[in-house]
Amino acid sequence: MGEQVTPDVIMQLGLGFWGSKTLLSAVELGLFTELAAGSPRDAETLRRRLGLHERSARDFLDALVALRMLDRGDDGRYRNTPAADLFLDRGKETYVGGMLEMANARLYPFWGALTEALQTGEPQNEAKRGGDLFGELYADPERLKGFLKAMTGLSLGPARAMAAKFPWRDHRTVVDIGCAEGGLPVQIASTHPHLAGGGFDLPAIRPHFEAHVAEHGLSDRLAFHPGDFFADPLPRADVLVMGHILHDWDLEKKRMLIAKAFDALPAGGALVIYESIIDDARRENAFGLLMSLNMLIETRGGFDYTAADCMGWMRAAGFRETRAEHLVGPDAMVVGVK
C-alpha cells in the first residue's frame, strides 16, 4: 500500500499565522520577560500581570506550551523554555524579540496585502500612503531605537558565527557598512582583541552606536563613521562587512555598493556580505525566499539572492577570489578577496 496522502501539512502551513501571531502577542505583552524575572507563575498570576481577559488566558498560555515556547509543570505553573528564556527576555543581550516586535507592529498587517504586491510589484508598507520606510523610521526616535535593536537581535547569531569562522587573524581593521547600533563589530571586537574599526551609517545613528559600543567597553577600538553609502566614499579597512544591506536594493544598486567596497579595500582586503542567502538550487532555504518576498512588501526594488549570484557580482567588480560559507540558521556569508 502506498503512503496515505493527507492535507495535514497544507493546513498547518495555511493556518500558520495562528501560531505566529500567538507568539508575537506574547512578545508584545512581555510574557517571557515576566517569567524570566522570577519563579514560575500560575495562570491567574500571569493573567493579572499581563492584563489578560479571563476567557483568553488559559488557552493562550497552553497554546504556547503546545508551540514549545513555554513549559508547564505538574503544579500548573508556567515557565519559559530554555530557548525562550535565552532569546525572548528583554533583559538579556541575546534578546531577538526586537525583530519580532517590529514584525508584530509593522510586517504582520503589511503581509496581509501580499497578493496585491505579487500582482503589482509595488511595496505594501508606508509607501502606499506616500511615506517612506526609512524616512519614517529616522523621523521617530523611539521607532528608530526599536528598529536598531531589532537589527542587533537579527544579527547576533550570524555575528557570533562570523567572529568564529572568518580568518580575522589575517586582518587588523574592520568596518561594518550600515552598522545600526554596532552589534556586529561589538561581537567581532570582543572576540578578537587585536581588531579595531567601527561602523558606517547615517549621522542620526551615531548616539545609538556610541552608546552600544560604550556599554561593551569598546569605545577605544570602535568608532562611528557618518555618511550615506550611496553618496559618500566608504571608509577604508582591511575588511568591510555588509549585513542585511544588499537585499534592500535593486540589482543596479547592489552592484554599485559592491564596487564601492572594492574601491575602499586594500589589496588582500575582504568584503563580507551576509544575510539569508538563498541556496543555489532555490529549493531549501524557505526563510531566504520568504525574506525576498518581504523585500517585495517593503521596498521598490529589493530582493534576496543566491551565493552564486553574489559571487558573480563580486567577480564582475574585480574581486579575485570568492567563497560562500554557512553561518547559522538560514544565514550565510559570501566573501570576496581583492
Image (cartoon, rainbow, N blue to C red):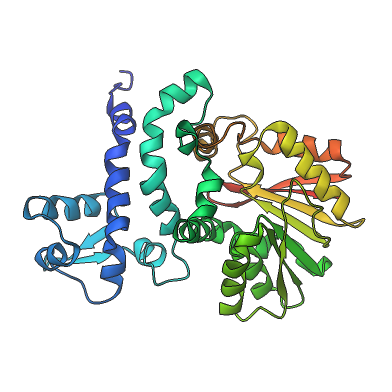
Q: Is residue 338 visible?
A: no
Q: Position of residue 71 (x, y in %)?
A: 24, 61
Residue lying at the far right of the rendered structure: 267
Q: Quadrant of the N terminus?
A: top left
- Closer to the camera, 42 or 295? 295
Q: Which picture quadrant has residue 61?
A: bottom left
Q: Position of residue 267 (x, y in %)?
A: 92, 55
Compared to 75, does 232 lie above or below? Answer: above
Compared to 307, does 113 lie above or below? Answer: above
- Closer to the camera, 221 or 80? 221
Kindly identify the residue that appears in the image at 41 percent across and 58 percent down: 97
151 left or right of 322 in image: left
Kindly identify the residue that appears in the image at 40 percent across and 44 percent down: 106
Kindly identify the residue that appears in the image at 58 percent across and 48 percent down: 331
Q: Position of residue 5 (x, y in %)?
A: 30, 21
221 left or right of 107 in image: right
Q: Position of residue 160 (x, y in %)?
A: 60, 64
Compared to 101, does 83 lie above or below? Answer: below
256 left or right of 118 in image: right
Kindly identify the residue that appears in the image at 14 percent across and 50 percent down: 59
Q: Is residue 205 visible?
A: yes
- Closer to the camera, 87 or 181? 181
